[in-house]
Amino acid sequence: MAKNHNAEDLEHLNTGDGVQAYQTLVDWVKSVPNVIQEIEENGTEEDLIRYKKQIKLVVEKLKEIREGLPEVD
């Protein structure tokens, strides 16, 4: 049911909002390697596990947003 709700939320995004949300998440993903390295050096194993779970959620959201965006040639 949550997937249906998320799809409805994406329908309400106008193209500009969707593109901006997508780009924000893409920029966040680009920072992942540095953050993982920092957590490995200074954090706990639990911190690393939580961050990796967060990465998975962001990747799923990227896929949802991308599906709702118009195709760019």
Image (spheres, helix red, strand yellow):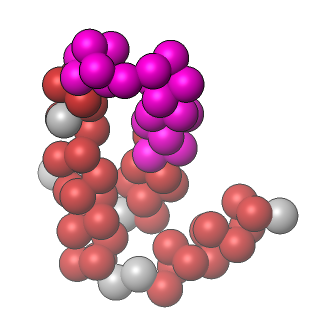
Out of 18 and 35, give the one closest to the viewer: 35
**Left or right of 7 on screen, residue 44:** left
| In this view, 6 is above or below 9 | above
Residue ID at (49%, 85%): 12
**Quarter containing the N terminus:** bottom right
Out of 16 and 24, give the one closest to the viewer: 24
Looking at the magenta stretch, what is its main secondary structure? helix
**Residue 40 rendering spot, x and y as whole percentages:** 33, 14
Residue ID at (42%, 59%): 65
From where the camera sits, is residue 36 visible?
Answer: no
Q: How many marks?
A: 0
Out of 44 and 54, give the one closest to the viewer: 44
Q: For residue 30, what is the image quadrant?
A: top left
**Left or right of 42 on screen, residue 10:** right
| In this view, 23 is above or below 34 | below
Q: For residue 53, what is the image quadrant?
A: top right
Residue ID at (75%, 63%): 2
**Residue 13 rendering spot, x and y as whole percentages:** 41, 81
Outermost residue, right side: 1
Q: Is residue 18 magenta?
A: no
Q: Is residue 40 magenta?
A: yes
| In this view, 61 is above or below 41 | below
Residue ID at (22%, 68%): 20
From where the camera sits, is residue 17 visible?
Answer: yes
**Left or right of 35 on screen, residue 65:** right
**Residue 50 rendering spot, x and y as whole percentages:** 53, 33
Q: For residue 55, what is the image quadrant?
A: top left
Look at the image and give the residue range highlighted in magenta: 36-58
| In this view, 69 is above or below 25 | below
**Residue 4 rendering spot, x and y as whole percentages:** 73, 67
